[in-house]
Image (spheres, helix red, strand yellow):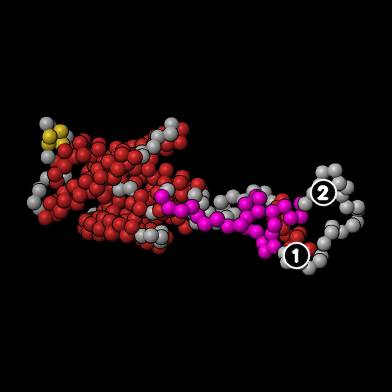
Amino acid sequence: MSNPFFSRSAAFNGRGPVAPAQTVTPNGYPTMPGYQPGAGRAQAAYGQASAGYGQAPAGYGQAGPQSVSPQQLSQLEAQYGAPSATNVDRGRMTYDDVIIRTAGIFAVILAVGALAWNLVSNPDTVALGYPLMIGGAVGALILGLVNSFKREPSPVLIMLYALFEGAMLGSVSGVMEILYPGIVVQAVLATLATFTVMLCAYKFAGFRVTGRAARILVVAMGGYLLFSVVNFLLMVTGVVDDPWGLRGVEVMGIPLGLIVGVLAVVMASFSLAMDFEAIQRGVERGLPTRYAWAGAFGLVVTIVWLYVEFLRILAILRDN
């Protein structure tokens, strides 16, 4: 599910104030005490002779209300002539920050997932698979909600989410691969292809989800989440004995899981576009670097959702 942090946070949704401005040099660096625009680069008025060689500028070294020492003047000159400051120099969030943190979260998910996969694939430890799957799913859901609704991103909680998510994904993927050989590779390729298409559509075709479409998407995602929770409870309590729960019910000969799954893939794909826009807005507004964790978390949640939906669709197709 897409990260509600983006839509709720004034920092990302565009309805809050821009990052506080600070006094900077023309190239964007923080100024020092006594800085005045153009100080040290004052030029003689047009048509007037400049000071002779070796002569000190008028007032140089004299005390005054805003006088600066030669050392400060030299430092100000260096700041004035330095290359333009980037977001990194200002301690602001960049796209690279989001990419690096996204890679770090996925590294944890893959490492824990590989361990969980081995446990469910080994006949001696396969009994651990089900509790590992349920525990990972519950932990990932709780920490996902906590991280989504926090006012400030927490790297520790986000990494804990990655641990539980890895346990759930690894065990689910391991079981699915045993039942349907080759399904994991297919789901991964489908996820990567969808991500690439949506990124290109956003970057080069100007695809955006805004206004009424964005509101409809949020409502639809809420309805899907409610359906998933109800279906999970019905399956756990044994009210529905179909392996896919309500998704196994056929509508005009088509499993409901396929219909719902396709709609979920569309929602997840559109959610990616909303995540891209939120991250772009965060960079342009100069959010502090720590908010890159929120951007990375939002992307990971959506990509994981997309992968799970493809995995389920492929499994249902193989059963029919």
Nearest the viewer among 138 and 277 is 277
Check the image and report above or below for 158 versus 86. Answer: below
Q: Which numbered dot is residue 67?
A: 1
The 10 Å Cα crowd at callout 2, few under 14, some 14 to 19, many 20 or more, is few
Residue that extends furthest to the bottom in the rendered view of this protein:
63
Q: Is residue 152 visible?
A: yes
Mark 2 lies on residue: 44
Q: Is residue 188 left or right of residue 61?
A: left
Look at the numbered disc 1 and give the secondary structure of its residue: loop
Q: Is residue 237 left or right of residue 34?
A: left
- Residue 102, how many percent across, how many down? 43, 50
Look at the numbered disc 2 and give the secondary structure of its residue: loop
The residue depicted at 75 percent of the width and 60 percent of the height is 73
The residue depicted at 46 percent of the width and 53 percent of the height is 17
The 10 Å Cα crowd at callout 1, few under 14, some 14 to 19, many 20 or more, is some
Which image quarter is the C terminus in? top left
Q: Indicate the quadrant where residue 260 lies.
A: top left
Check the image and report above or below for 186 versus 134. Answer: above
| Extent of the magenta region | 15-41
Nearest the viewer among 188 and 120 is 188
The residue depicted at 25 percent of the width and 36 percent of the height is 262
**Secondary structure predominantly adopted by residues drawn in magenta:** loop
Q: Indicate the quadrant where residue 180 lies.
A: top left
- Residue 137, how many percent across, how many down? 26, 55
**Does residue 18 belong to the magenta stretch?**
yes
Which amino acid, mark 1?
Answer: Ser
Q: Are marks 2 and 1 in contact (CB under 8 Å)?
A: no
- Residue 198, how many percent across, how many down? 39, 36
User: Marks 2 and 1, how far apart in space?
Assistant: 19 Å
Which amino acid, mark 2?
Answer: Ala
Nearest the viewer among 234 and 120 is 234
